[in-house]
Image: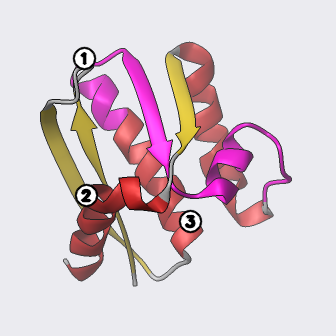
Amino acid sequence: MSGGGGIYRGDKGNFLFAFSTGYGLGSNKRAELHAVYDGLILCLDNGLDKIEVESDSKVVIDLLFGKSPTPWQWRPLVSKIVKLKQRRSFSFRLIQREGNGPADGMAREGRES
């Protein structure tokens, strides 16, 4: 079972909101991609326009920058994220695993729901 989640902070680091959701059976990379997409949609739905996505998955960040080939089963999802990025001002950044603890907690919560 896999889950995803995210923490939203303002430009000064203040907490805005969070989400968690279950994605069923699947890999952790698939769940990470789903969480990125769901998080972007949630930001847009809440009127946020300057969005910086942080992930501790180098594989996911490389896929979103086109630095590595996308496995066929992830292409539709990666394509959706890339299309959103082309229409809006998003940035993607790799962070250390230690800095991603709260979002990992939300993902665990989503997996268990």
Question: First in sequence: mark 2 or mark 1?
Answer: 1
Is 16 magenta? The answer is: no
Separation of residues labelled 3 and 1 (CA atoms): 26 Å
Q: How many marks can you see?
A: 3
**In the rendered structure, does residue 46 fall within the stretch colored magenta?**
yes
Residue range (magenta): 41-70
For this view, does 86 lie left or right of residue 14?
right
Depth check: 77 or 107 in front? 107
Q: Are marks 2 and 3 in contact (CB under 8 Å)?
A: no
Q: The residue tagged with tag 1: helix, strand or loop?
A: loop
- Residue 64 x/y as whole percent: 67, 41
Residue 104 rendering spot, x and y as whole percentages? 33, 65
Alpha carbons under labels 2 and 3: distance apart: 19 Å
Q: Which residue is mark 3?
A: 30
Instruction: Identify the secondary structure beneath mark 2.
Output: helix
Residue at 47% x, 55% y: name it: 34
**Picture disc at residue 47:** 1
Say which of marks 2 and 1 sits in front.
Answer: 2
Disc with the residue nearer the chain's start (2 vs 3): 3
In the image, 75 versus 99, the foreground residue is 99
Relative vertical location of residue 56 with respect to residue 109 in this rendering, above or below: above
Residue holding disc 2: 102
Residue 7 as seen in the image, left or right of residue 91: left
